[in-house]
Amino acid sequence: MEVFFNNLGSDESATDKLLHDLSLAEQGAEDLFEADGGNLAGQSKERFLTRVEKVKAACRSLQSKTVAGAKAADRAVHEHPYSVAGFAFGLGLVLGAFMLRRPAGTDESEEEA
C-alpha cells in the first residue's frame, strides 16, 4: 500500500502566505516612504528593504529544508516500516511512563491522611 502526502508540495502553504504578506508589507513600506516626501532617511528605507529580503530568503530556505526533511522521513518509513513502528511504540511507552509519574513534591503519607 502506497501512501502519498499531497501536502508536501508548495500549494499555498503557510510559508507561501507569509512570503505574500511580506511582499505586501514591502509594497506598503514603499508607499509610506513615497508619501513621506523624503523626510525619512534613505538609509532607513534601504535597511528596512534589506531586512525584508533577508526574511524572505530565510522563509524560502526553511520551506525547502522542511520539504526535504519530510521527503526523507517518508523514504525512511517506506524502507524500514517495522523499525519505525517499533521505535514509535517504544517512544510512546517512554512518554506514557513520564506522564504517569507523580509530581516530585507529593508524598504517599499525605495521600493517606
Image (cartoon, grey):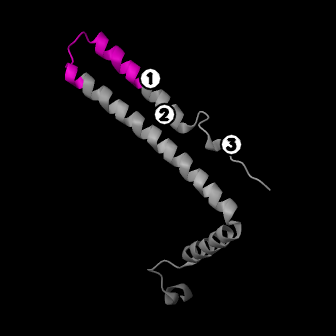
Circle number at residue 6: 3
Q: Position of residue 73 (x, y in %)?
A: 60, 57
Q: Is residue 23 left or right of residue 70?
A: left
Question: Would you place residue 22 above or below residue 9 in this image?
Answer: above
Q: Position of residue 41 (x, y in %)?
A: 19, 19
Circle number at residue 24: 1
Circle number at residue 18: 2
Compare marks 1 and 3 and give the one earlier in the sequence: 3
Q: CA distance from mark 1 to mark 2?
A: 10 Å
Compare marks 3 and 2 and give the one earlier in the sequence: 3
**Residue, x 59% and y 37% (percent of image)?**
10
Residue type of the residue flagged with mark 1 = Leu
Q: CA distance from mark 3 to mark 2?
A: 20 Å
For numbered disc 2, what is the local secondary structure? Answer: helix
Give the residues drawn in magenta, as a range.
Answer: 24-44
Q: Is residue 51 left or right of residue 61?
A: left
The image quadrant of residue 51 is top left
- Residue 26 located within the stretch drawn in magenta: yes
The prevailing secondary structure element of the residues shown in magenta is: helix
Q: Is residue 30 left or right of residue 62?
A: left
Q: Quadrant of the N terminus?
A: bottom right
